[in-house]
Image (cartoon, rainbow, N blue to C red):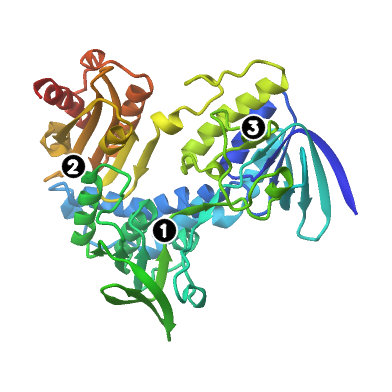
Amino acid sequence: MSTEQTFDVIVIGAGSTGENVADIVVRGGLTAALVESELVGGECSYWACMPSKALLRGTEVLEEARAVSGAAAAVTGEQDVRATLDRRNSFTSNWDDSGQAQWVDGAGITLVRGEGRLDGEKRVVVRASDGTETVLLATHAVAVCTGSAAAVPPLEGIDSVDVWTAREATSAQEAPGRLVILGGGVVGVEMATAWSALGSQVTLLQRGDRLLAGQEPEAGDLVAESLRGRGVDVRLGTSVSAVRQDGADVVVVTGAGEVRGDRFLVAAGRRARTEGIGVETVGLTAGEYLDVDDSLRVRGVDWLYGIGDVNGRRLLTHMGKYQARQGGAAIVARAKGDQVSLADWSPFVATADTAATPQVTFSIPQVASVGITAAQAEERGLPHTVVRYELGSVAGSALFADGYTGTAVAVVDTGRDVLLGVTFVGPGVSEMLQAATIAVVGEVPISRLWHAVPAYPTMNEVWLRLLETLRDQ
């Protein structure tokens, strides 16, 4: 037997994206139901952003202290692994979502626990753990915010091995003795950094010839050099053909031989979580990313929205929240009969997905970037020039750490005289990113940036050095 309830908007998936969609539409005067089968707060809160950064923070602090003569003398011991893991646990509330569920209730959102699936136009069926079903009907819109999951490649023998994905890597309660990581993207690099510092012997296998392949080349090169210096066995240009279990060992077969470990972490990308949620009942294909316009509305289905990782545009928590704000505003406007502009930078579109996405990789050194790379500018046929400057040559960097090593890269549109993208690589650079993001989003003319005077002595003085280098090119 099932019950039936009606809301203005139904949101499937109560991760950070879904929470924000529901909040925006309720603030806009609509009613909303939020459907979740796991933990309210989703991937970022329990298995991604928060736990991974908690694992990394202690290592970062120690690294910074050891890089300052005088302060280094105070570092007389090693990191307390158990205390680090316990601190990580605290940031996930020990995988208890009661606090976030309480926030949902306080925000005036109805939380419906269970597996939600589309069942035709504006209709969602939710099956609870006890088998009971609730039918939810939407008067205006349904937003699919089910996110993405780790993609596990079909390697020979993969089903016979207890594979780690990012979920297991960020929630493990002890450091594995030997950790083999497949994939040199953000997850692979961050987990190699974290677990090597917590006592694991790490081997990182990357099929391509550079880590962090989507970033400027300097990023992958400096991170690989740092990881190797920290004892990580970084193997570039290495393909994996099979895995198998051999007693307690996981054996990973590569083109150059076998690698043995206690754990095998697959960090080889993500896939859309659109299977088992009924997208086929509205003419879509299960397992594929949802094709949306810039207001995050699914093309061809005018009441359905795909927001966050599920659309494949930008698989980052902060971009999912951004899409939630923009898409939520579009839902509210359309529900009220207002016009929704799809022009770039309007209040209803996610223009930053393609023009100004910020991202930080919390490796050592950090990589902070926004906008597009030089390679992407080339692919898009944009007139541009590239400006580079060594961060270690700035007074603020020398004060931050003895022997500071890092770089700054700016991609300049020579036709419009604005920044297309900026990348910083080095210790502590994540806190410099918002200024770059504002410059890229605001399309601040280079001539005006000369008037944005950096305080001395800070690392931000690199902005002046980049401008001077551009002028002299």
Q: Which amino acid does label 1 sit on?
A: Ala
Q: Which of marks 3 and 1 is nearer the N terminus?
A: 3
Q: Which of 226 and 385 is in front in this view?
A: 385
Q: Provide the residue designation for mark 1.
A: 268
Residue pictured at 58% horizontal, 42% vertical: 290
* 353 versus 367 height, above or below: above
The residues tagged by marks 3 and 1 sit, at their Cα atoms, a distance apart of 33 Å
Q: Where is residue 365 drawn, in percent x and y?
A: 25, 48
Q: Which of 310 and 423 is in front in this view?
A: 310
The residues tagged by marks 3 and 2 sit, at their Cα atoms, a distance apart of 40 Å
Q: Which of marks 3 and 2 is nearer the N terminus?
A: 3
Q: Which of marks 1 and 2 is in front?
A: 1
Q: Where is residue 40 drawn, in percent x and y?
A: 63, 48
Q: Quadrant of the N terminus?
A: bottom right
Left/right of residue 147 with respect to residue 110 in the rendered view: left
Q: Which mark is residue 406?
A: 2
* 442 versus 167 height, above or below: above
Q: Which of marks 1 and 2 is nearer the N terminus?
A: 1
Left/right of residue 459 with respect to residue 3 in the rendered view: left
Is residue 430 visible to us here? Answer: no
Q: Which of 315 and 392 is in front in this view?
A: 315
* 233 versus 244 height, above or below: above
Secondary structure type for disc 3: helix
Q: Which amino acid does label 2 sit on?
A: Gly
